[in-house]
Image (cartoon, helix red, strand yellow):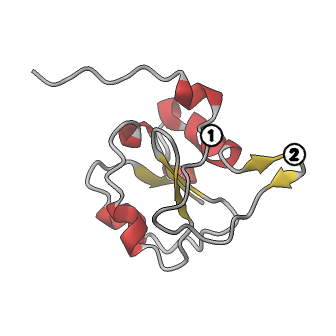
Amino acid sequence: MLVIGAACIDIKDGICTTSCPVDCIYEGERMFYIHPDECIECGMCESICPVDAIRYADELPADLQIFEALNREAFAGSEGTESPGGWRRGMDPRPDPEAIRDWPKASAPG
């Protein structure tokens, strides 16, 4: 499974969505999320991410391992994992998990 980590928070470049052949990367309020059941693990998004926020779950450093669960949580519905069926530009952002809503904002450079 591919996972989007902290480097995406408040950046949301979105170029990853253009390379995904199955449209499994969804916009959230503060970052993008990869749907765990829709991703085919092709790695296209990982290779194009300008902030190096995307990793395979088994390659996440210890301090970012929470993001595997947070990417799943972004799709949690009342009856398990929701499958929206592919992201399209213009869709409403998915609500961020509480941990992302509470994540500290990055300080401005300089």
Q: Residue furthest right?
A: 79
Q: Residue furthest left?
A: 110
Label 2 to label 1: alpha-carbon separation: 16 Å
Q: Is residue 109 above or below residue 2?
A: above
Q: Residue at x 45, y 53 (%)?
A: 55
Q: Is residue 21 above or below residue 46?
A: below
Q: Residue at x 59, y 26 (%)?
A: 99
Q: Nearer the viewer, mark 2 or mark 1?
A: 2
Q: Quadrant of the N terminus?
A: bottom right
Q: Is residue 94 above or below residue 6?
A: below
Q: Secondary structure at mark 2?
A: loop
| Residue 70: % across, % down | 62, 40
Is residue 7 left or right of 91 when viewed as pictured?
A: left
Locate residue 18: give its quadrant: bottom left
| Residue 73: % across, % down | 69, 42
Locate residue 7: give its quadrant: top left
